[in-house]
Image: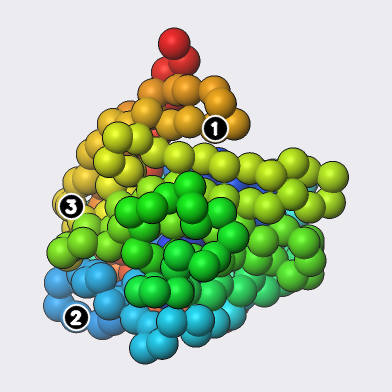
Amino acid sequence: MAGLSYARCPPLPRALMSRWLPLAALAAVLLAAPASAQISFSFDDLYDYADSGETVTRDLFDTGTEVPPADQARIDALIALRGAGQTWDFTTISYPIEEQTVTTVYFGGDVAGLPGASNFPSANYALLNDVPDSDPDGDGYVYADVANDQFITQGIYAPASGGNPETVITYEPDGLQQLTFPISLGTVTEDQTTQTIQGFIITTDYRSEVVGSGTLVTPAGSYETLMIEYRVTVSFP
């Protein structure tokens, strides 16, 4: 399955995608940034919310579970484009499924009262992600500690719904350093964390690198863009 989304907020971590966000497991994630000579992101570019409880909607263009060979070849060729001055034009891809995802942000004193917040006492920021067209009950909360120039994921919580049990994922001892700002071409973020999922403990090595910059062209419009490649290595004890 391949998909494409545009938003000013980040995608859900891979651990949640299979449950309520049907995006492709692409090697790279494209993020839209304001136009500038050297394309870069600040914290506010991705998390620019004026009020706690503010909700934004983003378009999700999904190719479905079976991608025609020609479309898959185009997708693979676009992902392979690295470096500065690139153009990633996804408008030639077929998207039989078009949905909207909804993200609501909470910060400050509002975080402590959210479902599952007690599992993440150091979190001062939370994102509620949902794909209402796909799974009306599939809400998931990403809890984070926003400090200085870092967005550090503390964990993920999903209430029981649709036959799925309650899910609690924690990153220890100090959370997963998801992004360090500002980010621009060549920025690298690395971290290692112990991840606890429903009582099972694994070790995760995380690395992100900004490998490209240029213009992203989607059915929703064109945007100045960075391409971020994520590499996650999971080790079981």
Which color scheme is applied?
A: rainbow
Q: Give the answer, above or below, for where 32 lies relative to 140.
A: below
Residue ID for mark 3: 187
Identified at 23% across, 39% down, the residue is: 190
Q: In terms of secondary structure, where does tag 3 sit?
A: loop
Q: CA distance from mark 2 to mark 3?
A: 17 Å
Seen from the viewer's position, the closer of residues 118 and 127 is 118
Numbered disc in front, either 1 or 3:
1
Please name the amino acid that badge 1 sits on. Answer: Ile
Q: Is residue 61 visible?
A: no
Query: Left of 108 or right of it: where is 210?
Result: left
At 79% across and 66% down in the image, what residue appears?
A: 136
Q: Is residue 136 above or below residue 195?
A: below
- Pick whichever of labels 2 and 3 is earlier in the sequence: 2
| Mark 2 closeness class: few <14, some 14–19, many ≥20 residues within 10 Å | few
Q: What residue does disc 1 label?
A: 197
Farthest top residue in view: 237
| Rendered residue at 74%/41% (across/down) | 165
Quadrant in the rendering for residue 195? top left
Q: Is residue 201 left or right of residue 189?
A: right
Of the residues shown, which amino acid type is indicated by label 2?
Ser
Label 1 near label 2: C-beta < 8 Å? no
The nearer-to-camera label among 2 and 3 is 3
Residue 4, given in percent of the width and then of the height, sits at 57, 62
Q: Nearer the viewer, residue 201 or 39?
A: 201
Q: Quadrant of residue 237?
A: top left
Point out which mark residue 36 bears. 2
